[in-house]
Amino acid sequence: MRLIVYTFFIATLLFFYSCDDEKRKNIKEYYYPVDDLKKGQVYEYRSMTNDTLPPMYWYYSSINTDSGKFLISNYYDHTFVNKQSVLEEIVSTGVLTKEYKLMSANPGEVGISIVDIEVVKDSAFPFSVKKDGGIFPMELKFKDPTDAQEDIRMIRQRKYLGDTIFTFKGKDIPAVIFSANEIREFTHSEKGDFDNTTFATEIYAKNIGLVSRKYNIGEIKMEYVLHERFGIEKLEKMASDFWGNEIDLIPGN
């Protein structure tokens, strides 16, 4: 009798796990195409809510080492200043944030200011999701580079919401939607503490990556969408024209 009950119990568990697996969706192909980014590529994002807002540029490149596969992301503002650098590791279950840096450097000038951010929770993007399947948190801690008395804690909570279609360059592409709310907590020894939350929605398109980020900061609503993808040479030409001298934007060169 015990054997029969035990066998039934195991079979029931396997049945429910099987049902759970069937409900899950593999979305690895919806993140950036890491294997195609070995030579690097620039993603240009433009505002959909305000034409006067400047574009944003993210340069993505991937590397394979003895310790794993990694994606390097560098953000350049409209003056082509490198503001952020992020190193992510690609593992079987998803994407993990390994390093996060705030950058301050002007092209053509000597010297660079770097703020190393402590990565407390490293979940950047999951490869297996289901509706109502929980939140994937990333947490960062650092000191305000302009005020050593202020500590900043940022928590990004990604949650899979469902599937959609995103139109890019006239083509309808399968995509997934995430909520990606960000909580920022500021602690100051003299000015006191305060916090704010940004409520965001992100869309990732298959074989492209992030194509839309819509967010609310208080009463302000903003949305940036992917406008174009191109090589780093084009961005360097744009930066050279802007600054009036030849610019090398590739980090480490």
Image (tube, helix red, strand yellow):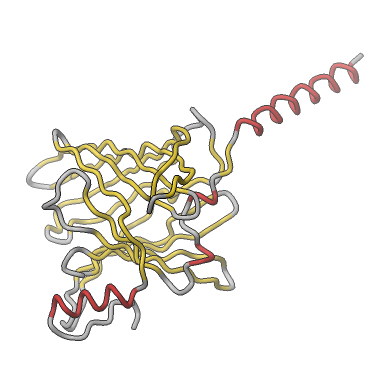
| Residue 236 screen position, x and y as percent | 26, 77
Q: 212 or 125, which is in the foreground? A: 212
Considering every residue shown, the one lying at the far left of the view is: 191
Instruction: Look at 75% across and 28% down and name the residue there.
Output: 14
Q: Is residue 239 above or below residue 26?
A: below
With 104 as the anchor, is 169 left or right in this view? right
Image check: 21 left or right of 205?
right
Q: Residue 205, position in %: x, y?
A: 44, 48
Image side of residue 103 versus residue 15, left or right: left
Q: Residue furthest top?
A: 1
Q: Is residue 25 above or below residue 209?
A: above
In the image, residue 244 sits, relative to residue 10, either above or below, namely: below
Q: Residue at x 19, y 69 (%)?
A: 104
Residue 49 or 35: which is nearer the viewer? Answer: 49
* Image point (12%, 60%), residue name: 146
**What residue is shown at x 30% (from left), y 49% (from top)?**
225
Q: How many marks?
A: 0
Q: Position of residue 200 (x, y in %)?
A: 30, 38
Residue 65 occupies quadrant: bottom right
Relative to 133, residue 186 above or below: below
Q: Quadrant of the N terminus?
A: top right
Q: Residue furthest bottom?
A: 246
